[in-house]
Image: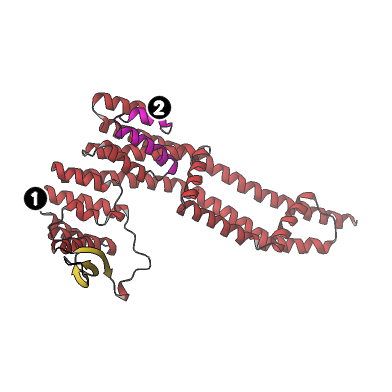
Amino acid sequence: MSAFKYVVRDQAGKKVRGKRDAATEEVLRWQLLAENFEVQSVKEVKGFNQIELSPQRVPATEIMHFSRQVAAFVRSGISITDALEVVEDGSENKRFKKVVAQMRESIEQGVPFSDAVAEHASIFPSYYLGILRAAELTGQLDTALDQLARYIDRDHEARHKVKAALTYPAVIMFMSFATLIVLALFVLPKFAKFFKQLGRELPLPTRMLLGVADFFKNFWFVVPIVFFLFAFLVYLAKTTSGGRRVKDRMLLRLPLIGEIVRLAVVERICRIVGAMTAAGVPLPEAMGAAIVASNNTVFARGLLVVQDRMLEGEGIADPIGDSGLFPRAAVQMMRVGENTGTLDLQLVNCSEYYGRELEFKLKKLTTLFEPAVILFMGGVVGFVAVALISAMYGVFSAQKTGV
């Protein structure tokens, strides 16, 4: 139970302030309304030791295990509250443990399961609540939870493959730039001092290399400025609508990378819409959840138009095809699904197909990227070696001939 401060008006219009314990803010609001109060505000009271500067993140795997466990309990005939109590005891994530406890208390107060989940919608995927509500109406809660668990598992696996494929090239690129910075800031200045003492004209590659070393020596502050500028641009691209729009457009237009981003978004949208329609969620509502989960402003803006046309009764295949965002094969599979009444199955097949395509493209990208980075690094190191060796050879040759 948590403590809340509230401000209400009674039937006479008098403002009343108070403090009361309740499972959640929503439960307290319902209690006050049942007592014929007009609720103006409800705010949780936290002690100093309860204040979280950065709340613990709830990983997708935690939601997946939660869905799978609750589905198994419901199928066995165990009550939701007992199932949540077991999940609460077994969870190692402190934030999610607290969320499950609040959900259990809300259900004990008479709140439906989907509404109890909705009170904590921020930690669940955008499509989760829609599928749960549809499943409660059709009496297929265990099936829907199993379906959600499988989808979250597949989505987590797809994201893990993307990260794993990009980790090695990213590490190589980072080490390459780190090596260049160390050479420019610490190694080359010592050679520059040595060559300057000799007083002889150096080969062009050596002069170019020493010019780079002088630049970093005299303008060393450029490196942190560039780093912080890059970090600031990344921050803008993640937190502002304009930055996200520019970032998404650039990513979609990049060679190789743009195709991978498009395949990832198409796979995610097809999987979400397929899962939600299979659970009985109306198609426009499923598309709304997919728009939120697409995590791409270009697709989101295009799919809003698609959703409007779907609300007008145009179906999904023609609006999706007119958007120009999806491959022709995906549009054709949707059209077949509409004509045969198997749209959910076709969307799942579509997502699996483009999931395999995404994996193939990622392997192809890493196959091309790794040797390109190695060649770049080898070229830089080779240039440094040639510049230094040619200068040393010229000096020793001049000393040997007595010139």
Is any part of residue 145 visible from this angle? no
Q: Which residue is mark 1?
A: 77
The vertical placement of 367 against 15, above or below, is above
Colour scheme in the image?
Answer: secondary structure
Q: Residues within 10 Å of mark 2 (few under 14, many from 20)?
A: few
Say which residue appears at 33% left-offset and 27% top-offset: 333
Name the residue furthest bottom: 48
Alpha carbons under labels 2 and 1: distance apart: 45 Å
Q: Which quarter of the rendered picture does the N terminus lie within?
A: bottom left
Q: Mark 2: which amino acid?
A: Arg
Quarter of the figure with residue 388 = bottom right
Residue 334 picture quarter: top left
Going by the numbered disc 1, the residue's amino acid type is Gly
Q: Is residue 100 above or below residue 259?
A: below
What x and y, as percent, mark residue 130? Answer: 24, 45
Q: Residue at x 43, y 38 (%)?
A: 262
Q: Position of residue 393 (x, y in %)?
A: 79, 53
Q: Residue furthest left?
A: 77
Residues marked 2 and 1 touching at CB (< 8 Å): no
Instruction: Identify the mark at residue 59; answer none if there is no mark.
Output: none
304 falls in the magenta region = yes
Residue 289 position in % (x across, y down): 31, 43
Q: Which residues are magenta?
A: 296-325
User: Which of the pair 278/137 is nearer the observer?
Assistant: 137
Q: Which residue is mark 2?
A: 328
Instruction: Point out the residue furthest to the right here.
Output: 403
Which SS class for mark 2? helix
